[in-house]
Amino acid sequence: MYFKYQVDEKNSGSTVMNICMNKFGFSKNLIKRLKVDGRVLCNGLPVFMPHMVKAQDLIEVYLDFKESSENIVPKQMDLNILYEDNALIALDKPAGIITHPVNNNLYDTIANGLVYYFQSKGEKIKVRPVSRLDKDTSGIIVFAKNQFIQDRLVKQMHKKTYRKKYIGIVEGCPDKDEATIELPIARVPGSTMLRMISEDGAPCITHYRTIERFDNAAMLCFSLETGRTHQIRVHCKALGHPLIGDSLYSATPTSLINRQALHSHFTSFIHPVSKDRIKIESKLAQDMITLQERLK
């Protein structure tokens, strides 16, 4: 990945550091790596970050780091790729598989399959998830191919220009066809997994819109302004309509589906390089389609 900028009169006297941050949008952590590797040039020569530039100087940066996830064992998997270019890759994650290795599962994760995929193409790319999904949530998951892309997409999340929508099927029918749930979420004391509504929790905002009503269930579309762990699941429980099949937040057992009925079906963001708005969609998972048909 290549960046260049010819200094104009307005930015004459700026430092190379300021150019990298303000013109290219590099984070401080990325700039530290560039300093070490000597990948920033001014008029064709390596340059230090405090160097002051003049009008017409040409600043060039080569982001071609060769990275690898050496701690992740490659494993061949049938990855469903929804979108890919030289900056990022989006996959359609099935339910029942986690994103990244953990102590009790080092080999059967999306990251293992992605490392194998990169290696099979002769690419040295580190696995950099932009967002994650719970093990039993299906749908879109995005990975950046370098630190710059990851930084820019995470920044879009903070600025709320990175959009995500989910489809879920809940127990019962909410009174309103659409509404906003704005309740803070915190970790349940003594648990590393469970979350709860708490005044001391982090701010969380979930919008929902009803897609379809059944006799004693409803299919909802959720859009998030925040992205906390288990946010939709906890907010649905607080609404009085937990997700069908949610083993953590629903007290009602079901044989209709063997996981929480939640699918990440739409993601949209500004591409960090082209500046185009990218829209990615995932079809509803088959077990949720079957659930929908059984509820009709």
Image (spheres, rainbow, N blue to C red):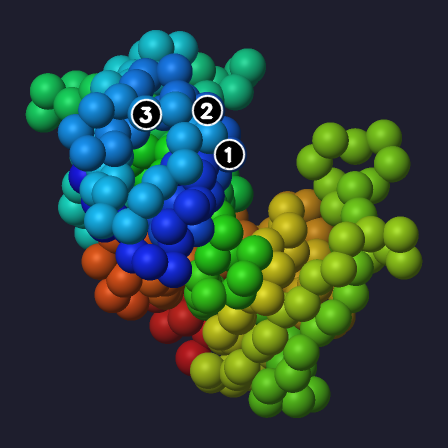
Between 44 and 181, the one lying in front of the other is 44
Q: Measure how far apart labels 1 and 2 are at the Cα level.
A: 6 Å
User: Looking at the picture, how far across and down is residue 7, in whole percent?
Assistant: 28, 50
Q: Which mark is residue 28?
A: 1
Residue type at mark 3?
Val
Q: Measure how far apart labels 2 and 3 are at the Cα level.
A: 13 Å
The reply to whether discs 1 and 2 touch (Cβ–Cβ < 8 Å) is yes
Q: Quadrant of the N terminus?
A: top left
Q: Helix, strand, or loop for circle 1?
A: helix
**In the displayed structure, does residue 184 sit left or right of residue 38?**
right
Residue type at mark 1?
Lys
User: Looking at the picture, how far across and down is residue 71, in whole percent?
Assistant: 40, 11
Q: Helix, strand, or loop for circle 2?
A: helix
Q: Helix, strand, or loop for circle 3?
A: loop
Between 286 and 266, the one lying in front of the other is 266
User: Which of marks 3 and 2 precedes in the sequence?
Assistant: 2
**In the displayed structure, does residue 39 sit left or right of residue 105?**
left
Neighbourhood count class around disc 3 (C-alpha, 10 Å): few under 14, some 14–19, many 20 upward: some
Q: Which mark is residue 32?
A: 2
Question: Is residue 35 shown to the viewer in this render?
Answer: yes
* Residue at figure coordinates x 37%, y 50% from the top left: 12
User: Which of marks 3 and 1 precedes in the sequence?
Assistant: 1
* Residue at figure coordinates x 75%, y 60% from the top left: 203
Q: Is residue 203 above or below residue 187?
A: below
Neighbourhood count class around disc 2 (C-alpha, 10 Å): few under 14, some 14–19, many 20 upward: few
Report the residue marked by disc 3. 47
Q: Measure how far apart labels 1 and 3 are at the Cα level.
A: 16 Å
Q: Quadrant of the C terminus?
A: bottom left
How many discs mark residues in the rendered view? 3
**In the displayed structure, does residue 103 sit left or right of residue 5?**
right
Between 239 and 116, the one lying in front of the other is 116
